[in-house]
Image: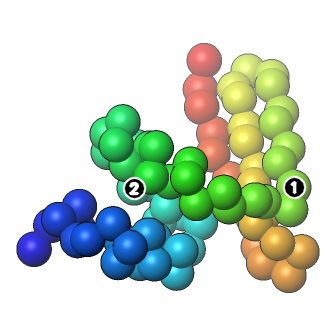
């Protein structure tokens, strides 16, 4: 069964229990999944953006969790 075939309430409940990285990956699938991810209103503790020879984005979901790091090379 495709996750998007779940009833709306079950899908939302499932996504609310996902880790931030899983929700981020899910949001890249389509416009529908992006809008579903945005509708969860998940907040992060800290976002740091460093721009140099590359763009580095660090996301810290909460004070007690580690950070996610994305690097984009120019």
Which of disc 2 and disc 1 is earlier in sequence?
2
Split into 4 quadrants, where in the image is the C terminus?
top right
Tell me where residue 48 sits by quadrant: top right
Residue 68 appearing in the image: no
Q: Which residue is mark 2?
A: 26
Secondary element under disc 1, as helix, strand or loop, is: strand
On the picture, is 58 further left or further right than 38?
Answer: right
Q: Which label was assigned to residue 14?
A: none
Residue 15 appearing in the image: yes
Q: Residue at x 46, y 44 (%)?
A: 35
Q: Residue at x 76, y 73 (%)?
A: 66
On the picture, is 27 further left or further right than 3?
Answer: right
11 above or below 37? below
For the residue pair 8 and 16, the one nearer the viewer reads as: 8
Dot 2, how many residues are within 10 Å of its Cα: few (below 14), some (14-19), or many (20+)?
A: some
Q: Which residue is mark 1?
A: 46
On the picture, is 11 further left or further right than 59?
Answer: left
41 above or below 38? below
Label 1 to label 2: alpha-carbon separation: 21 Å
Give coordinates of residue 25: x percent, y percent. 43, 54
Dot 1, how many residues are within 10 Å of its Cα: few (below 14), some (14-19), or many (20+)?
A: few
62 above or below 54? below
Give coordinates of residue 42: x percent, y percent. 68, 61
Split into 4 quadrants, where in the image is the N terminus?
bottom left
Q: Residue at x 76, y 50 (%)?
A: 58
Tell me where residue 49 sits by quadrant: top right
């Amino acid at each position: 069964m495709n996750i998007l075939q779940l009833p709306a309430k079950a899908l939302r409940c499932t996504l609310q229990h996902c880790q931030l990285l899983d929700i981020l990956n899910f949001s890249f699938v389509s416009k529908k999944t992006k809008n579903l991810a945005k509708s969860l209103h998940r907040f992060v503790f800290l976002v740091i953006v460093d721009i140099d020879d590359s763009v580095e984005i660090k996301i810290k979901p909460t004070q007690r969790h580690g950070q996610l790091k994305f690097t984009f090379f120019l």
